Image: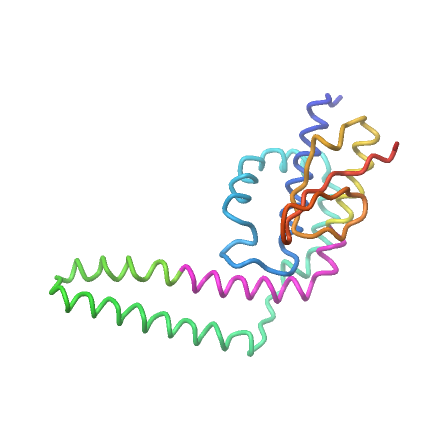
Amino acid sequence: MKTHYGFSRIVEGLSVYITELDSLRPPSRFGVSSLSVVRTIELLFKQRQKYYFFKNNRELKQKISTLMYDFRTDTKVDSKEMVLPIVFLFSDIFVIMAITIGITNFYSLNIIQGCLILVLVGLPLLFVFFSYVLRNRRKVLGERHDKELKKSVQILIDFGVQFCTENNLNPEMFPIKLRHDDYDGLVYETKGHNNFVGFLKNETE
């Protein structure tokens, strides 16, 4: 028999899962991840709760996995989608090599020092490149599968509302950080552009 603590862990894990899925919907943020660094770190420390939620709700997890199958397996890439990334990549390589060669020649650096400059110059520019490419890819997938993503989140929210009501949990103890405010069953607080905190509605009120 689960305790109140066990029920709370389930809802905490549910909140993490909702945040992760919601972040995949457009508009896509710039970066290698669909979540900010701060949000990623926050969720990293709550992964045990998410897996606890999965462990205790296998049928629901399977239902969401089935609904998300097309999104997860979508490898279709439009030729137009690749034009700008390829141009961006060659531009990046040109800039990296030009800066490296220029600094190496100007200061008469040896090969090892030149390689170090190459790494120092290349890493930030490659990070920008991959952030751009991954953002564009997430944008395409998010727009293509927004209906499935939104439906998946809504199913989880509906489960959370019912679960909190049945187990007499206070929804205010389980804030859900979101980038969208178009779901039913939540009370929203606006924190900024595409930045919301949602609280599961109490069905008894």
The image quadrant where one finds the N terminus is top right
Instruction: Look at the picture and state if 190 lies above or below 174.
Output: below
Note whether 56 is above or below 145 in the view shown. above
Residue 118 horizontal/vertical position (percent): 26, 62
**Residue 69 horizontal/vertical position (percent):** 68, 57
Side (left or right) of 59 relative to 193:
right
Left or right, residue 147 beside residue 31: right
Against 57, residue 133 (above or below) is: below
- Magenta residue span: 127-152
Is residue 144 in the magenta section? Answer: yes
Q: Nearer the viewer, residue 12 or 204?
A: 204
Among all residues in the image, which is located at the extreme right?
204
Q: Is residue 156 left or right of residue 125?
A: right
Magenta span includes 185: no
Q: Position of residue 151 (x, y in %)?
A: 76, 54
Secondary structure mostly seen in magenta is: helix
Nearer-the-camera pick, 181 or 143: 181
Q: Give the residue at x 22% y 57%.
A: 116
- Residue for point 80% across, 27% down: 167
Residue 63, horizontal then vertical, whole percent = 75, 48
Quadrant, the C terminus: top right
Q: How many marks?
A: 0
Residue at coordinates 68% horizontally, 41% vertically from top-left? 176
Residue 162 quadrant? top right
